[in-house]
Image (tube, rainbow, N blue to C red):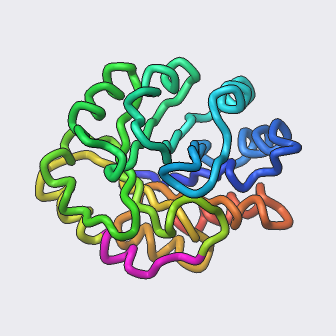
Amino acid sequence: MQTKLVAPSLLAADFGNLQRDIELVNKSEADWFHIDIMDGVFVPNISYGMPVLKAMAKHANKPLDVHLMIVDPDRYIKTFASLGADNLSVHLEACTHLHRTLQAIKAEGMKAGVALNPHTSVSLLQDTIQDIDLVCLMSVNPGFGGQSFIENTYAKISALKDLIIQKNASTLIEIDGGVSSKNAKKLVETGADVLVAGSFVFGSDNPTETISKLKEEIA
């Protein structure tokens, strides 16, 4: 059985103590760092850009799962590869030629991910699913941390899992938004492989212990 992964989202970390929080994740049972790049155009918020990611990569010793919430992501594929991204996810809604984008990401040695907004049907991936390493299902509307989980996500996980099996793909299913101990177990039972947790981890009294408990719940 495939190990289920936890990826703390650094969007919820203390930006004034970023190195401290990265070291915390390094020493925890977390599997990946989830890093949201927002441009203020595709989503209404701006997070951080290349210089900050470069600084993060210098201290992180676990894979960098980079999620681009930006327009025209093709322009920056080589840049994010050079900054140390291990996984690079682009939004289907931002890609005119998704297949070409996926091939470009893989050509740079990264795992290719596709993110879907809550309103976007997983059926739109049926022609590309075998080329996708990771599908990031947004379980909140992208752009801000701390939002409530959208319950329809469970149905989307089931539909995506069916598509992956039907196409004999090896794609991982990642859930991003509103993940907590209240829904973690049900998410992996429905078919999720990777849980992104931001506010739930960094807003807790003991983030290291919170990560450990999440891992325990989905084991």
Question: What is the quadrant of residue 144 in the picture?
Answer: bottom right
Q: Residue 95: x, y in percent?
A: 31, 43
Q: Find out whether residue 151 is within the magenta segment.
A: yes
In the image, residue 106 sits, relative to residue 157, either above or below, namely above
Residue drawn 35% across and 66% down? 191
**Residue 37 makes an appearance in the image:** yes
Q: Is residue 139 left or right of residue 124?
A: right
Q: Residue furthest front?
A: 41
Residue drawn 29% across and 48% down? 171
Q: Residue 140: x, y in percent?
A: 51, 69
Q: Is residue 150 left or right of residue 63?
A: left
Q: Is residue 19 left or right of residue 179?
A: right
> Which is nearer the eye, 161 or 70?
70
Question: What is the quadrant of residue 151 in the picture?
Answer: bottom left
In the image, residue 133 sits, relative to residue 184, either above or below, namely above
Q: Quadrant of the N terminus?
A: bottom left
> Which is nearer the eye, 194 or 36?
36
Q: Which residues make up the magenta segment?
A: 148-157
**Residue 219 makes an appearance in the image:** no
Q: Residue 59: x, y in percent?
A: 74, 28
Question: What is the quadrant of residue 49 in the picture?
Answer: top right
Residue drawn 53% across and 55% down? 43
Q: Residue 200: x, y in percent?
A: 69, 67
Q: Is residue 5 left or right of residue 126?
A: right
> Which is nearer the eye, 107 or 73?
73
Residue drawn 23% across and 31% down? 100
